[in-house]
């Protein structure tokens, strides 16, 4: 009973409270909250075409949530998923437009792999700096985020810029690198299935393999793990590299499945959303699936709510919901252990 | 070449360093007392928004600054409450502060200001009597009062931290909460004060952004400056004077970047992105101890064992 409360009821309760707080904010801003909530729900679930768009919003959040969760399970707080996502996205876009002559599934596969690889390297750097020099990963990943922002900006405005466009974006990827669309008439690609498969694979890796067991042991108590013979520093950079690779994959899937090119500032902060998703999902791969669905639908619904309410209720209210969710979970569950 | 390194470059470096140094002083107070504050960015953003909105509503720049600082203090209180009373992870709580500010400021901006109006800002101080003094006159006359504050505050904070009993207690709380408690120091009370002051200073830096130059708030106005301030804290090894020196250096890089824009430096075309990312790169290098390691206060971010 206690376990099921912690795993299921608590996140649901926290999410409901956070939406209630958002409703209060909406009311205080002078808009009637109930019609806004109704429109929010409608846009997330019941309006025509709402569900596929909600799943489209879920996809990047599922990847970034998994990325953050892997890090946290190993005791590493990877705030750098945003940077890893940007690097992976740009790398996969480059493979998409610069490599030609490959047949369809291979080209896309290669682009995805390169995206994951580059994201993984971007996560491995803070990991190895922590394992090797004790540099705190929170600070180094924040710094790596900003370096990624400027590096991608430089590359997309000055090196790989689409010569036929005024805006800072790469040329369009060749169709052989595009991810196939799942359902006719929607923008939903097989990226969603890749994200779900990643969650399943991660669940298996963490719960059914020795590597996963050691990773969680390091996260639970690094000293005890070291005493038991786990090579802690290898788990630190390994978990950060895996986390970064999943972050890179998030960017690659957005590029290859939705935009078909990289453009500057395409990510509205998916990497940071991942923190809320991981916490709400209790760092459990299947919990993260649930949390990504909830937040993805919420984000999609808010766009609709903004468009039908007068005066418009700005969709940024979703960021407030995420913040409140994190505050509550941080206070109730995510407490730092002594020492 | 001669046109690049003129007095205007250094004046602009001072201006760009000001929000970094002010927020960095906040970061030092919080972190020296043992509380990680990556919420500087959010506190700065909230300060910028509330300061500007209040200045629009009340018609006074200084009242706006006051309101902005109060908002930052409130966010600081929230962070202290979570980390001290509820023993939440400092980084998680700080991220929530950042998200809350990012969401709430844009929500309120879009909801209430279709076209953001200009506010009455905080005017520059003329200080014409400084002008005859070589260099100093050129640098400091007709600058914002915030710039003057940025030059004085680090010395005040240095004196406070290293030459008063209160400062000793703050540093003790950050180095060893347990021993401090045994010595009869109210660690939690000290941390509340330091984190609230930290939020106030970061928000003050924010009001400088929105009330000292264009006097208007734009979405995401802090644009990573809170994180650069954090970098300055680390680069300056958690000392007020060191962090200010780092902030001045980072401000200079930014000024240089804005000045170059396609120009060459010593015959080399330096992309602005390289100069912009240098503060972050240098901080990683400093933190990894590749060139003299930065070591944080010992109990930073830790919770005490059972009450």
Image (tube, coloured by chain):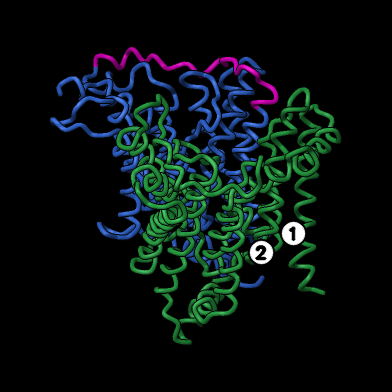
Chain colours: A green, B blue
B132 left or right of B267? right
Q: The N terminus of chain B appears in which quarter of the rendering?
A: top left
Considering only vertical position in the picture, is A182 above or below A287?
Answer: above
Residue at mark 1: chain: A
Q: Which residue sits at x=60%, y=51%?
A: A59
Q: In which quarter of the image is residue B129?
A: top left
Instruction: Reply yes or no: does residue B126 show up in magenta.
Output: yes
Whether residue A304 appears in magenta in the rendering, the answer is no
The residue carrying pointer 2 sits among few (fewer than 14), some (14 to 19) or many (20 or more) residues within 10 Å by Cα, namely: many
Q: Where is residue A13 in the image (x, y as percent from the top left)?
A: 80, 56
Q: Give the range drawn in magenta.
A: B109-132
In the picture of the structure, the residue carrying the numbered disc 2 is: A282
Q: Residues within 10 Å of mark 1 (few under 14, many from 20)?
A: many
- Which percent across, then down, holds residue A219? 53, 72
Question: Where is mark 1, residue-wise?
Answer: A11
Tag 2 secondary structure: loop
Q: Say whether residue B297 is visible.
A: yes
């Amino acid at each position: 009973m206690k376990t099921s409360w912690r795993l299921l009821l608590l996140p649901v309760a926290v999410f409901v409270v956070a939406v209630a707080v958002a409703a209060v904010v909406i009311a205080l801003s002078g808009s009637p909250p109930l019609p806004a909530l109704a429109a929010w729900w409608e846009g997330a679930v019941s309006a025509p075409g709402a569900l596929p768009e909600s799943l489209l919003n879920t996809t990047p959040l599922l990847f970034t949530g998994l990325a953050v969760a892997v890090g946290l399970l190993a005791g590493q707080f990877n705030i750098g998923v945003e940077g890893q996502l940007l690097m992976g996205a740009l790398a996969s876009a480059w493979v998409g437009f610069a490599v030609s002559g490959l047949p369809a599934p291979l080209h896309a596969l290669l682009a995805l792999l390169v995206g994951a690889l580059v994201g993984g390297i971007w996560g491995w750097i803070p990991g190895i700096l922590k394992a090797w020099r004790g540099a705190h990963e929170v600070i180094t990943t924040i710094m790596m985020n900003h370096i990624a922002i400027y590096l991608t900006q430089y590359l997309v405005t000055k090196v790989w810029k689409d010569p036929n466009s005024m805006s800072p974006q790469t040329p369009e990827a060749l169709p052989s690198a595009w991810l196939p669309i799942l359902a006719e008439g929607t923008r939903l690609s097989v990226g969603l299935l890749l994200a779900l498969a990643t969650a399943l694979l991660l669940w298996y890796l963490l719960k059914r393999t020795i590597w996963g067991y050691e990773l969680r042991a390091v996260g639970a108590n690094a000293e005890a793990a070291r005493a038991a013979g786990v090579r802690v520093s290898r788990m630190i950079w390994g978990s950060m590299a895996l986390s970064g690779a999943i972050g890179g994959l998030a960017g690659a899937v957005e590029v290859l499945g939705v935009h078909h090119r990289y453009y500057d500032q395409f990510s509205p902060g998916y990497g940071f959303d991942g923190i809320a998703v991981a916490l709400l999902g209790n760092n459990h791969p299947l919990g993260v699936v649930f949390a990504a669905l909830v937040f993805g639908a919420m984000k999609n619904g808010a766009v609709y709510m903004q468009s039908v309410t007068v005066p418009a209720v700005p969709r940024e209210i979703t960021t407030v919901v995420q913040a409140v969710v994190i505050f509550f979970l941080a206070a109730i569950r995510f407490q730092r252990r002594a020492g | 070449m001669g046109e690049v390194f003129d007095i205007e470059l250094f004046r602009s470096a001072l201006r760009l360093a000001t929000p970094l140094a002010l927020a960095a002083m906040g970061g030092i107070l919080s972190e020296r007392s043992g509380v990680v504050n990556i919420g500087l960015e959010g506190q700065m953003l909230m300060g910028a928004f509330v300061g500007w909105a209040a200045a629009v509503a009340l018609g006074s720049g200084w009242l706006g600054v006051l309101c902005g600082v109060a908002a930052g203090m409130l966010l600081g209180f929230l962070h202290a409450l979570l980390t001290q009373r509820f023993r939440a992870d400092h980084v998680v709580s700080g991220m929530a502060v950042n998200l809350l500010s990012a969401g709430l400021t844009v929500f309120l901006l879009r909801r209430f200001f279709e076209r953001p109006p200009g506010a009455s800002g905080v005017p520059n101080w003329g200080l014409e009597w400084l002008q005859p003094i070589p260099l100093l006159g050129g640098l400091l006359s007709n600058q914002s009062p915030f710039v003057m504050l940025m030059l004085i505050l680090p010395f005040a904070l240095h004196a406070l931290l290293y030459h008063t009993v209160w400062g000793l207690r703050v540093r003790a709380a950050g180095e060893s909460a347990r021993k401090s408690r045994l010595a009869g120091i109210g660690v939690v009370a000290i941390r509340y004060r330091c984190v609230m002051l930290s939020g106030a200073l970061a928000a003050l830096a924010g009001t400088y952004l929105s009330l000292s130059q264009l006097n208007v708030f734009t979405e995401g106005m802090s644009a990573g400056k809170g994180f650069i301030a954090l970098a300055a804290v680390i680069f300056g090894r958690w000392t007020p004077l060191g962090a200010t020196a780092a902030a001045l250096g980072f401000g200079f890089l930014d000024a240089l970047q804005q000045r170059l824009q396609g120009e060459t430096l010593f015959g080399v075309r330096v992309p602005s992105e390289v100069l912009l990312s240098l503060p972050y790169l240098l901080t990683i290098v400093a933190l990894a101890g590749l060139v003299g390691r930065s070591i944080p206060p010992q109990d930073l971010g830790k919770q005490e064992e059972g009450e």
